[in-house]
Image (cartoon, rainbow, N blue to C red):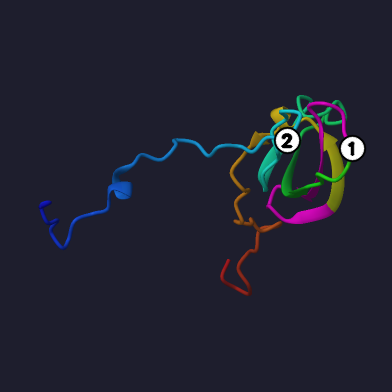
């Protein structure tokens, strides 16, 4: 006869360790897929980005034919406040995308507002 487990025993699966980093999915050719998120695109991602831009990736366009180690993505280009300024489709190297934290939403006034009336 087997020993009875206490009523509050944790299942064995609770104690298994999780991977430290999420496993990135790969395409058939071994190129990593691009996950949605905020990225900095530099010259490493594509020669067109001499001046780096910050983008929010909407999705990877997996149905398009690409060269090995390249991908088509749909993105929103972000300004320094984190607001989307335009929507684009870009041809990039996924290994050149640098994940960055989303820009802060704090806005500074464009001009200083002085006191009104005779409070000067």
Quadrant of residue 66 within the rendered picture:
top right
Residue wearing tag 1: 65
Q: In this rendering, is residue 9 above or below 12?
A: below
Residue wearing tag 2: 27
Crowding at mark 2 (Cα within 10 Å: few <14, some 14-19, many 20+) = few
Label at residue 112: none
Can residue 79 be seen here? The reply is no
| Left or right of 18, for residue 56 | right
| Left or right of 15, for residue 24 | right
Query: What is the x, y in percent for residue 33?
Result: 70, 38
- Residue 74 included in the magenta stretch of the image: yes
Can residue 100 be seen here? The reply is yes
Start and end of the magenta stretch?
Answer: 66-86
Q: Could you tell me which residue is drawn at 86 percent across and 46 percent down?
A: 89
User: Which secondary structure lies at badge 1?
Assistant: loop
Q: Nearer the viewer, residue 107 or 83?
A: 83
Nearer-N-terminus badge (1/2)? 2
Query: What is the x, y in percent for residue 87?
Result: 84, 53
User: Which secondary structure lies at badge 2?
Assistant: loop
């Amino acid at each position: 006869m087997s020993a009875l487990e206490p009523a509050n025993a944790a299942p064995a699966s609770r104690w298994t360790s999780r991977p430290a980093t999420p496993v990135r999915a790969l395409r058939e050719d071994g190129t990593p897929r691009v996950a949605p998120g905020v990225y900095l695109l530099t010259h490493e991602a594509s020669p067109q980005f001499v001046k780096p831009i910050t983008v929010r990736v909407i999705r990877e366009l997996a149905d398009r034919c690409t060269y090995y180690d390249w991908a088509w993505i749909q993105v929103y280009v972000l300004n320094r406040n984190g607001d989307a300024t335009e929507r684009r489709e870009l041809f990039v190297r996924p290994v050149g995308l640098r994940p960055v934290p989303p820009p802060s939403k704090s806005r500074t006034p464009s001009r200083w507002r002085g006191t009104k009336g005779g409070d000067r």
